[in-house]
Structures are given as C-alpha cells and as structure tokens.
Image: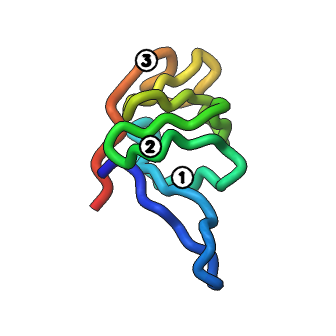
Amino acid sequence: MRTRRINSPTGELHGWRIKCPGCGEDHVIDKRWNFNGDVYRPTFVPGISTTGCVSFITNGRITFTLDSTHWLRGKTADLPEMP
C-alpha cells in the first residue's frame, strides 16, 4: 500500500497519508484533492505543494518539479510503501 486513509475524530474521511521519498517525511493530502481510489497506485489531482516540495502523484509515482528543494528535484520516483 502506498497511501493510507486518515479519518477525522468523528470517523469521516480527512485525507490520505503518503511518505515522500524526497524528504522522508509523511505528508497528508486532504479530501479536497481528487483521488483515484487505488491505494497501491494512487493518483491525486491537482499537484501537491508542501514546504520545499512541489510534486505530482500519478499511478503510484511522484514527480518533483524543478523548484523542489531536495535531492529528487526534477525526477520521478515510486512512492514508498506505507507500513
């Protein structure tokens, strides 16, 4: 599994958690993003912007734009498996 569902305290969908291979941190993509529903090969639309990282997640792979600030800038990598 490359993404995990996160529920609010009331049990409703809050969003999805991924592990970023660029910074090594977990990021939460909230329910405002469109998700294809595939936890093994997730696609989220539109792109995602976090501190120092702009990326696009398509079919379980993450593409970092050239303005990302870590070692994977301008590259595409598989999303790591979630424990």
Q: Is residue 64 left or right of residue 76?
A: right
Label 3, label 1: how many angstroms apart (C-alpha)?
18 Å
x, y percentage for residue 73?
Answer: 50, 21
Label 3, label 2: how many angstroms apart (C-alpha)?
13 Å
Please tell me the numbered disc located at residue 27: 1
Please tell me the numbered disc located at residue 75: 3
Instruction: For the residues labelled 2 and 1, say whether their Cβ atoms are less than 8 Å apart.
Output: yes
Mark 2 surroundings within 10 Å by alpha-carbon count, few (fewer than 14), some (14 through 19), many (20 or more): some
Q: Secondary structure at mark 1?
A: strand
Residue corresponding to mark 2? 20
Name the amino acid type tagged 2.
Answer: Cys
**Residue 51, quarter of the rendered image:** top right
Count of numbered circles on the image:
3
Instruction: For the residues labelled 3 and 2, say whether their Cβ atoms are less than 8 Å apart.
Output: no
Label 2, label 1: how many angstroms apart (C-alpha)?
7 Å
x, y percentage for residue 48?
Answer: 63, 36
Name the amino acid type tagged 3.
Answer: Lys
Name, please, the residue furthest toward the bottom. Answer: 10
* Point 52% across, 67% down: residue: 6
**Residue 78, quarter of the rendered image:** top left
Name, please, the residue furthest toward the front. Answer: 37
x, y percentage for residue 57?
Answer: 50, 31
* Point 48% across, 23% down: residue: 63
Residue 27, placed above or below residue 73: below
Q: Earlier in the sequence, mark 3 or mark 2?
A: 2
Please tell me the numbered disc located at residue 2: none
**Residue 80, quarter of the rendered image:** top left
